[in-house]
Image (spheres, rainbow, N blue to C red):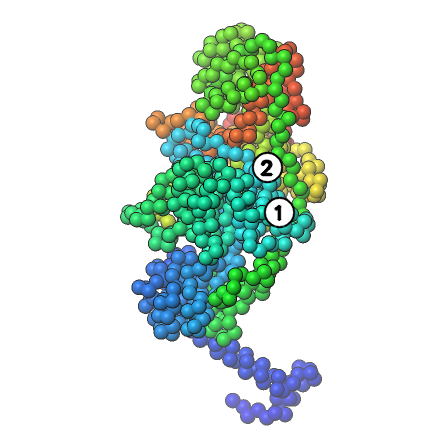
Amino acid sequence: MPDWREDDVETLLHTWGEDIQYEAFVNWLFELRENSRRSNKKFKVAIFSCAPYDREWFDRTNEELGSNMEFTYNTEQLNIDTVKLAEGCDAVCTFVNDFAGADVVEALHQLGVQMIALRCAGFDRVDLKAAEQFGITVARVPAYSPYAVGEHAVALMLSLNRQIARSYRNSRMGNFSLNGAMIGQTLHGKRVGIIGTGLIGSITARVMKKGFECEVVAYDVFENPKIKDPEPQGLAIPYVSLDELLSTCDFISLHAPLLPSTKHMINFDKLKIMKKGIMIVNTSRGGLIDTKALIQGLKDGTIGGAAMDVVENEAPYFFRNFSTSWITDENIAVLLRMPNVLLTPHLAFFTREALKTISDTSLKSMAGVREGSGPPKQNGKLDCVCLPPKQEPSVQRKETQAAAMSFMQSLPPPVHPMKAEYFPAFENADHTFRIAFFSATPTEIEAFQKGNEEFKGNFTIDFYKSRLTMESVDLVKGAQGVCIFVHDDASAEVLKALKAQGVKMLGLRCSGTNNVDKDAADELGLTVTHVPGYSASSTGEHAVALATSVIRCIPQAVENTRRCNFELNGLLGFDMIGKKVGIIGTGRTGKVAARIFSAGYGCEVLCHDVVEKSQIKEAPPNGLGLRYVSLDEIFTQSDIICLFVPLNGKTTKLIDAAAIEKMKNGVILVNTSRGGLIDNKALIQGLQQGKIGGAGLDVVEGEDAYFHTDWSNKVVEHDDLSVLTCFNNVVVTYHQAWFTVESMKSLCHTTLRSFHACRLGEEPPLQRNKYKTVVSKQDGDCTASIDFMSFRRSKKEIESA
């Protein structure tokens, strides 16, 4: 070292500017050297409950940050029997089911451990008073991904309501039949209760109100301004008492912390006041619900269903594989076998974005303890240090959380749900009118019999399970009308046979008309009607349900837990906020999905359609403020692509090998429109190559012979369908996007009203005074047409493809 004199240093400093002071420079130099010495010092950390993905992300982040941490990886959970594994370590890193009670904390202190780093938000399994007593710093990750958990809560709600997991299981067994147990509800206009309105609860509330346009109410000990304040500052959601919320809501989602005051907040007493058939979602802590009360409510029908990422007494099982062992907790065992229960193994946090945040925040907290400065605030806002409570959580903490929620913004107000005046009774229905009803399911039979009575239709309806074909056409003898569904045959040959039998009208109880030869119908003078607007909300919501189920691996997780495998391997998802969603076709259904993705989830939505609609591109409150782009931009930019277009000559095999080649790696593909829009072979190849990250399909090319029937005891000869249902990352529901209570009523009323007009010799009326129900050859396919530019191909090209 050279012998530096003070004037030598001053001379050197003057070259940097006259304001540099010798004393300040020396202090800075020694502080830099000390920090460097500390950061170069090894800091040994024992990671408990360590899974392969934990090791991958902590090693990666340790290298990226240059943290110089030394990890020991333990698959065992931390408890008094395993605490010795922390010997020689400066810190332990634990997860949700590790236990650090007073005895464990004392043992850690005796081993010289300075810190407990929780790689989660909850700290209910750490004795904070003991930690304070023994001078052990406890830090957590307060907001590792509120979006991941909030979005998972919605995904669970959608999967429970629309029977996604059951459809996934059934389709893999070849059972494609629809029955009453498969019917869901349209979420639009339903009352949803949010219990706990911190960051996560607020995100869920926003998706349900702004996206699904539900009537949302909230309960919390401390009222969050971002929830109750009027727009645009808040969401304008009212706070109500817990009893009012439970007694009036159709769905509830729990987002409260587990405290002595919140333990078993859902209990036997609350069952007595709950709205019949209420659906419960819990992604917070299992102890919020008394499991015995939950099981009783599910058995007696008070609770219509439960979707849970957490369950009471989960700790011995979750994140471990018990598929070759047994579950000794009888309550968990009972829940796993209930058909109206979905259980995922505490994976609400499990997204790429969350794992990155967890490892990053945890390592920075460890570095802070090593360097003596303490864990820094996450993102400079949220305190990571856990201290024993002096009192109940303060209002200041709630306000801090609310201030961090910068994602709230003004969006279009919700519209009113379907009104009773949409379903008037029929007048002048004095004489009977016979209808031959094909492809009838038990649910449809019940609905149309009830509707015939409710609307005073005076129809005689003959229900047939068989499909309309040339072989079954004789069944229509004596009928003036024939009612068919998507898979029935209305070719020219069949229509001529119907005409010969004296049929006056063909009524489709669906929107699509591609199974009808409209030219032949016009030539024969047969009136053909459909139901253009019965299921826009149902189908749009189902598309979102499919997308979220694929992204968050809901059906796979549910199937794993049913086999008592609670590991998370293979179930990694991603946060939806900020992702690009391509909407191809912006008719009524496409608009519903676009609104949910953009206004609810905060996705960047790109649209394509031949006709650019003002309700899509105009700024709020008149529209959604979305961009129309080319198909190529949809393909190359989108993380998720949803199809909402009719099947016609221009759209057949719209998604083929050339289109898939243009798509981003890992894209999620969703189709609730018509199976023929996608080339099955190209889709399968894309999935095999990993180009397509997953698919949610309510329709499949060549489905006609299989969907809505049970093939579990037969050989499915449709090879592509068999192959698709064997992909773990493909969810196949069997043309049930429309299948909700609300859609069934609308479909029933519109169809019978059209037959009533035919009986009176009148033109079938508009549906809800808006939508044309009569189909003619001039209309083409009555759903919105779309120009696919470079994908416009000749009939010969389509057939050769």
On screen, 795 above or below 171? above
Callout 2 secondary element = loop
Q: Amino acid at mark 1?
A: Ile
On screen, 161 above or below 399? above
- State which tag comes first along the sequence, 1 or 2: 2
The spot of residue 75 in percent (x, y) is 35, 59
Residue at the image position 47 percent from the left and 41 percent from the top: 272
Residue at the image position 67 percent from the left and 24 percent from the top: 769
Q: Nearer the viewer, residue 104 or 302?
A: 302
Q: Is residue 144 left or right of residue 565?
A: right
Can residue 396 be seen here? The reply is yes
Residue under label 1: 237
The spot of residue 573 in percent (x, y) is 48, 49
The spot of residue 296 in percent (x, y) is 40, 41
Say how many tags the image has. Answer: 2
Q: Nearer the viewer, residue 637 or 769?
A: 769
Q: Which mark is residue 659?
A: none
Residue under label 2: 189
Q: Amino acid at mark 2?
A: Gly
Q: Cα distance, mark 1 to mark 2?
A: 14 Å
